[in-house]
Each structure stands twice: as structure tokens, then as C-alpha cells.
Amino acid sequence: MADKTAILSVGIDVGTSTTQVVFSKLQMDNAGGYFSVPRVAIVDKKVVYKSEVYMTPLKTDVLIDTDALRDIVAAEFRKAGYRPEDTDSGAVIITGESARKENSDAVLKSLSDFAGDFVVSAAGPDMESLIAGKGSGAWQYSMDYHCRVANLDIGGGTTNVVLFEDGETLARGCLDIGGRLICMNPQGIITKVSPAAAVMAQAAGVSVSVGDRCDELKLTAVTRQMAAALNAYLGVGTKDIDAILRQIKTPGSSDFPVPEKVQAVFFSGGVADLIYHESADTWAYGDIGVLLGRAIRESRLFTDFQKMEPGETIRGCGCRDIYNDDFRKYHYLFR
């Protein structure tokens, strides 16, 4: 006899660029019976509150502002009408470049007391790829249509890629390609050029440095080089940039063999909004996200494959139960 239980779960997602808090009611079903091993699964999920998307607060390029982040989360608990003790389960997940900040462990510890039975994790690039691919709908689509599907989750600092076929995960990988690898202030002066962006600029044959005034032609050349790298990653376009791909491979990510016969591509992550829906203001976010979205839309990634738009892009994942052998338990992950 199945035993069904409803629980309140909260997800706190701290990404390179943005942070969001989501509350969901989960219907849990133990189908194991009284005399067998419990088999617990999420059979229904309803999002009951979703916060606005905040810019992840930083003290410096290498430090997250822990106090400001706690203030954001505490305020969202109040807005949602819940207390930390009301939650039964949840996850604090730190992703992208935020997971490489010097105080990322302290941030996770600081946020872990906002709910009861929490999974607290720096997800790691391979797990991020899987979470995003399941949340965007790419995994389900591969099962429903018995085809090979790629999901590219393009955020502020990284692009997580996963390849599914008939619900099976064929490959996962990650590149340091994102919308906030080059940033500028309201006066149009460049304030940040990441190492990966510098590699892309050199490959594009342009010079981009902190203190320079924004040059749209130069930055367009950089983002087109980023798009070319993503094309090559999925086996289309330029074939001679393996050395560049090695330089911008995200630390800790798996090797991603060049796939064959990809039939559909999903885009998720913050930059995905700018791929599907172009912004009229090139510098709207103080970074190269708009230019990167435009470069991808003009590339073969957008013309050679069937394009599928997920229901949500900035936070493509709702609540998912993903079994991860590294943690040996179910994670209720929000993204």
C-alpha cells in the first residue's frame, strides 16, 4: 500500500550572476509497502512561491557577500510567509563561478540553517549540467520522442552542456563561456575581463582590457568566438579550435566527446532569455550577455538543429529528484 506525504521544500540557488529562492509543495509517495524496502519518489510538485531574481551580491571578484545573501534569503522567507522551521526539505546549491569563490564553503554553511533537512552543495559542473538538462525539459523530450537532445545552460560564468538519448545521459561537460565574463560600468568602461574571455579575445584577434571603453565591434568579435566554440563543442562549424576548448574547459568538468546526430537543442540559463528574446539595449545588464545571445542566435547552433524553448530559461529547473551517488541520497534541487 502506498504511503503519500506532502512536504514543504525550499531551493536556494546561488549562481554566478543571479540568486533565487523557490518554495514548493512536494507530494511524496512511498510505494515500497510495509514489508519491503522503501521506494520514495516525488509524484507531484507545485511551486507555491518564487522570489524575484537577484544579482548575486559580491564583496570582491573572489568573495561573495555572505551577509547580503543571508538578508536576501531571510527577506524572501518573510515574503513567502514561512519560517525556516516550516520547511521539511530543500537545497542550497551554489553553481558556476560562485562555486569557485574563496568563501563558497562559508556561504553554504551560512545558508544551511534556513531549513530543516537540507542538502547543501557546490553542485560541480557535471551535476549542474544534469540538473539544468532535466529542468529545461531536454531529458523528458529525449524520452518522449526517442531522440538525441543537447541542453546548453548558459549563465554568467559557465555553459553547462549535457547530451541525452532516450532518457539516458550520454555526456556532460562545461566551458567557461558566459554573459558576465566581461563587465562594464554605467559609463561604458570595462571593469572585468575574465581569463577565459581573454583567451576568446586573443583567438578573435582583438585586444580587450580593464579600463578600456566598450567597443561593440571588438566585443562582438569576442562573443562570436564564444559561439564558435560552442558550435565546435556540439560538432558543427569550426573544427580546429581544440586548443581553445582545452583552455576554457571548466575545472572539474568531464571530457565531452564531439557528439553525432544531435536532433534537438534546448537553451537554458540567463543568456537563453537573450537568445530567444533579444534585448534592444546592448548594455542593459552591464556585461556581454546581450551580445553573446545575439552571436549564438546567428550561429549554426540556432540553424542546424531543431530548437526547443523551455518553459523557463533563467531558472529552467523546477523541483527534481536526482539520485547522486556522490551524496548517496535524493536531492531536491531548484534551478
Image (spheres, grey):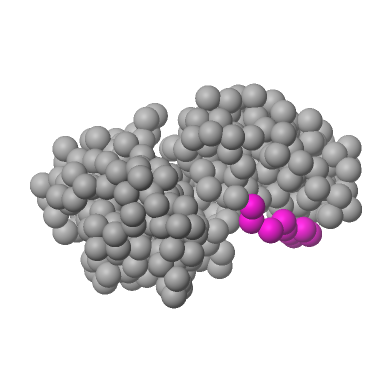
- Is residue 117 shown left or right of residue 315? right
- Is residue 163 shown left or right of residue 238? right
Residue at 17% x, 46% y is 203
Vertical comparison of 4 with 89: above or below:
below
Vertical comparison of 280 with 166: above or below:
below
Q: Quadrant of residue 148?
A: bottom left
- Is residue 4 shown left or right of residue 166? right
Magenta stretch containing residue 202, yes or no?
A: no
Which residue is nearer to you in this view: 237 or 170?
237
Q: Quadrant of residue 193?
A: top left
Which residue is nearer to you in this view: 129 or 4?
129
Q: Main secondary structure of the magenta part?
A: strand
Tell me residue 313's x, y (percent). 52, 62
Residue at 34% x, 57% y is 214
Please report the bounds of the magenta region as a residue range: 45-54
Residue 173 visible (yes or no): no
Q: Residue furthest left?
A: 240
